[in-house]
Amino acid sequence: MFNFKLVSKSSESRARAGLFETEHGIVETPVFMPVGTLATVKSLTPEELYAAGVQIILGNTYHLYLRPGQQIIEMFSGIHKFMNWNGPVLTDSGGFQVFSLAKLAKITEEGVSFQSHIDGSKHFLSPEKAMEIQISLNSDIIMCLDQCIKYPASRKETEQALELTTRWAQRCKDFWINNTKTQNTLFGIVQGGMFGDLRESSARALVDMDFKGYAIGGLSVGEPKNMMLDMAELTLNMLPENKPRYIMGVGKPEDLVELVARGADMFDCVMPTRNARNGQMFIESGTINIYNSCFKDDTQPVDKNCTCYTCRNYSRAYLRHLFMSKELLVYRLTTIHNIHFYINLVKQMRKAILNDKFENFVRNFYQKRKIT
């Protein structure tokens, strides 16, 4: 049960507005998915996510497989009832976490042998196992297992990882097609590092496999901003217009604006939640660090134009007091604001696209961010 519909396109850029239907609801694009790695967006309840306008959240196969384990979540018929979230869920395959967190990971044609970063226990993740776990989680959108590589990486290393990712993608799709329990939608992940021709090769191979949607992985891993945008644009242009396009792990508000302008539909990133817990808050003109002493007697809300729960009820001075006192409430309040900021940003972009005023939106966005 997955249908993507392209609703509107900008006449001055590649920006587009669409929607897709899942078993747990309709999602309007462009969309930002808050990261709920362990079946929770840190510090927030589902009710607070709904209030912020969140449509879909992201969970992670690697983490949920290790803790609490797929068998526990299966007792609740999937992740939705387990965490009391009734909206759509996308789960990443765990490939990036095996690359970045797991100990002594060994990659072979069959899959990845690794030790848990939690207790050192030994595990094996194959393409088929990644599918099995995600199907048992009952995620609405599931991702193929891919091999992630560091930046910079040699052409040979990148090419080998790309070829393995492509073979794994076919195994994932074969398992998904043949599993009678699946009600999920499967996305392929384009890799290829920072080599344009390899990105093109990966995109062509995955498009030939005819997935329901396509993700672009391996970006925002330390490469220069211009390189990230160039690789994203090149890859987006290779993907079908009638399928959703998902940029994984990106990024800053200006990254979302630039990538929507290039034709991207879906995003996830830990930045709004992680930065909130470190005291950084996103506002129209950029960011503020709420722990700075200049806010100790500031009676203003975080952002005077924001309508989130935090800005409607609390001052910068109060938030700074909580942060300096290490009171737990501050992590919740700062996260509410940052999530609201990101959700509102993509909603504003969608509205601008529908009204064919996206370029005006971009100009106003950057003009506001020049304010100090």
Image (spheres, rainbow, N blue to C red):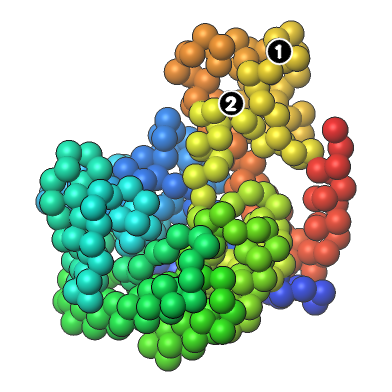
Q: Is residue 20 visible?
A: no
| Mark 1 vs 2: CB contact within 8 A | no
Q: Quadrant of residue 157?
A: bottom left
Is 122 positioned to the left or the right of 197 in the image? left
Q: Which badge, 1 or 2, is on the more N-terminal residue?
A: 2
Spot occupied by residue 304 in the image (x, y as percentages of width and height): 77, 29
Q: Quadrant of the C terminus?
A: top right
- Does 316 appear above or below 76? above
- Does 167 appear above or below 8? below
Give whichever of 58, 130 is nearer the camera: 130
Spot occupied by residue 278 in the image (x, y as percentages of width and height): 54, 28
Give whichever of 200, 250 is nearer the camera: 200
- For label 1, the SS is helix
Residue with the mark numbered 2: 279
- Does 284 appear above or below 211? above
Instruction: Answer few, some or many: residues within 10 Å of disc 1's Cα (few below 14, many 20 plus, some between 14 and 19).
Output: few
Mark number displayed over residue 293: 1
What is the count of numbered marks? 2
Q: Is residue 271 visible?
A: yes
For marks 1 and 2, give the CA distance.
Answer: 12 Å
Identity of the residue drawn at 63% across and 78% down: 234
| Amino acid under disc 1 | Ser
Identity of the residue drawn at 50% across and 36% down: 274
Instruction: Answer few, some or many: residues within 10 Å of disc 2's Cα (few below 14, many 20 plus, some between 14 and 19).
Output: many
Spot occupied by residue 156 in the image (x, y as percentages of width and height): 44, 77
Is 66 positioned to the left or the right of 209 in the image? left
